[in-house]
Image (tube, rainbow, N blue to C red):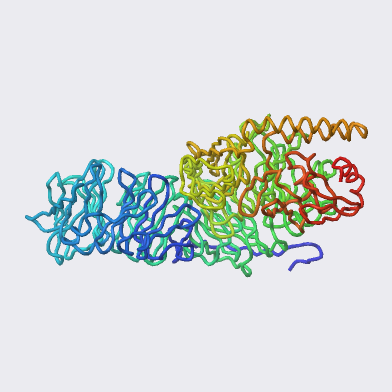
Amino acid sequence: MGNRSKNKCFLITFLSTILFSTLSFSQHPQPIFRHYTAEDGLPSSEVYHAMQDSKGYIWFATDMGVARFDGYKFQNFSLKDGLPDMTVFNIFEDYKGRIWFATYSGKLAYYHKNNIYQYKYNDELQKHFKILYKSSFYVDGEDNVYISVYGQGYFKVSKAGKITQYNNSETDGYQIVQIDSSKVLLSMYGELELQDILSIQPDDFIIDIHRSASDKNARCIKYRNNVILFALMEELIEVRDSTDFSKYSFEHNAISLMEDKNENVWLGTFEGGVLFYENGIFSKPARTYLKGLSVTSVMNDAEGGYWFTTLENGVYYIPSNEFLTFSKSTGLPDDRFSSVTSDGRNTVFAGIDKGTLYGVNDRLIHEIKTSLNLPTPSYINALFFDQADNLLHVGTSGVSYYFFNTKSLKGSVTLNSIATYDIIKRKDSSIWTGGMRGIRKLIKKEWVHPIDLKEIGTRISALYDDSNGDLWIGTLQGLGKLDNNQWIFLGNKNKLFKTRVTDIAETPSNMLCVATRGAGIIFLDNDTVRQINSSNGLTSDNVNHIFIDKNAIWLSTDKGLNKITFVNYGRFHYEIETITTLDGLASNEVNQVTKIGDEIWVATNKGLTFFNPQKAKPNTSLPPIYITKVNIAEKDTAILDQYKLDYDQNRVVISYIGLSYKNPNKLQYAYKMQGVDSMWSYTDITSVQYTTLPHGDYVFLVKAINEDGYQSTSPATINFSIAPPFWETAWLKLLCLMAAIGAVYAFFKIRILTYNKDVVRELMVLLLNKMKRTKFLVVKTPTTLVKIDSKKILWIQASDNYVEVVTNKKAELIRDTMNSIYKKLPVPQEFIRIHRSYIVRIDKITAINTESVKIEGRKISVGQTYRDELATVKKQLSL
């Protein structure tokens, strides 16, 4: 047994067998779903269908009406809004943009221009059927309505109301009818107990499907290359022609079928989740998502996201199918993955908090069990795979450190006596570790101290052997390196290197990269030091890990994954991409990253996520933008293209919405009122307020910008024309101007010129400003952006952490400071600071004494330090 005082370590070596056991949790990885239920605004959690209309809104059919979703909130429709029945199975948009609803009672309705209208031939349809299951429904370009009815074939209703029933009178069974080049209609006719025939029109051939029972949930779609897919109960039939078709079986009854934009096929089942067939290859096992739920429809939206409706639990959404995760939901005992690495070929290794080590091959995860006599499982801090020796080194938070050969299945465990934070292999092939008690070197399964730690410190968080063979060391105190066994602390030259270091790496151009806790990432290129942090593109200043992949630098942070791509190292030109939970990560708390093949593997606090960055593309979908509400003089109005208003209708509030479901809270809006604003203003608020628009003609424009910088194809616009009051007419203006000039001249001649030329200059500025067009103070309240006519402001008052702007009509509460709000005033010369808590508009003062001023009957105290300046104003105003 060794002696602790001499820092000797225990060594126990075993020739052991490594057991890669496929356990019960070796399931398919899952996407991270966003979940919507009745608590979020849906009318019900029993949802039958999802559809995105041509404007970009998402519609849901439920047993309690329909809902329209804009990414922020649900707008629900029921009987009182015009629906003929609360249970809606199908939603369809026709060529006119009408949104049709097919209900359980067999009655139809459609939504058009903000109203729901019941189909005028409902009464005639009720004579033919009184129940509609979730079935095929279609409206063609000539306003013909097609409805399939279980057991009765299908019906066609012409624009004039003529109803024709179609069925295959010669053979009972299922019939697939080609309506147009892209649409097929599925119908069923005959006895409900026995249906084993599938006929396809207009090709007029029949397939024996050998079914002992019929099912009202049978589905069909037209697939690529004119292939027909038909799903019935536990079977899928791929029909190419009358003699060329294939059958595939699965466990649960099919209830929905969809082809996405990438030609993948999704098959929803009853209580069996949804089956995903990549590229429509049915001979390979499907990936199963939402296991245990009944998936009634799958919809692929304009941004590439997927929506899944269920009978039991509302709606699920994923922004992409490219991000998949192993976590507790796939059977693992814990979610928090602390470390990850790969063998560079086909296996990923990952460790979790509880000390369990996993291997992943072909997207299946396995616990790696060894017969090594390991101590109590510890947190796995560090993983390093030595490709030359095929050894996986595992450093933990306890005293154990072990490694094993993944080919010979032989391994060793050593008692390192320290928690291990980093493992590297130097150019002399020696293994070095950094940890709680300094640096250790592994020589023939023995640990030694290679260097004296008195100057360096005892907690080593990062090690790196650079291209020149220099050893860089990261500690709690910062960055240093060994030069001929001499410790050089870089924090003495640059205070940035006094920041806690978490990882060190090197670019292909031999530029050193230093990850820090609090200062982002620091680059050292010879003597040049540069920094990238949250102020110039990173999502966080706390970087946990660096992974170099050619010119790409992947940074693990506590606020997502960041990718820095260098365009030019010499000029330090780079681009930054950010990947977060809104893209599909399991968590924004990212611990480590590795790569195998084309896939990036991310160890997070809520699972192990992987994705192909080439397929996880930016959101290039241009967000549509719509005006949703116009409030004039504090009254909501109908939304029009143009408004003609009287002079006293000049308080306008405009609400708008941009449609983006991938990341709605990251939408930015650019707006301006032509005639008032010379430049675009930017906000994340969905309304803007103009409190006192002067008379004139205006055009309001607003556009949405998504998280990747793509903006609406064209802005939404509204025109305003505000008539002038009689006192703003040209003849009255001319008369008043002449009187004002005479009065100003007399005032200057008699009262002012004898006092102070500087006062004259100040009053001239005030006069010129009054003759200009209205100036606005733009402020942000908790709910909206407000433009306040500066002429209407009485005073500005500090209130704790807020500022209150008081006008002659109302007060606006703003989270700001007095100094900041003063700088935002369009004409600061029109205001005066009379107290540390008050700024008042000069021309609103009606009385002044040494201790207070009066504005509209309100007495406001004057601070001691402001009295001299106020005395000058008093003389100017003759108060």
781 or 410: nearer the eye? 781
Tell me: 675 left or right of 470.
Answer: left
Residue 597 visible to an observer of this rendering: no
List the single residue furthest toward the bottom.
Answer: 376
Quarter of the image where one finds residue 448: bottom right
Residue 637 visible to an observer of this rendering: yes
Residue 102: x and y, percent? 28, 57
Residue 449: x and y, percent? 77, 54
Q: If the image is split into quadrants, where does the N terminus sit? A: bottom right
Q: How many marks?
A: 0
Residue 660: x and y, percent? 49, 47
Residue 442: x and y, percent? 69, 54
877 or 768: nearer the eye? 877
Q: Is residue 178 above or below residue 285?
A: above
Q: Is residue 311 above or below residue 230?
A: below
48 or 331: nearer the eye? 48
Tell me: 641 left or right of 506.
Answer: left
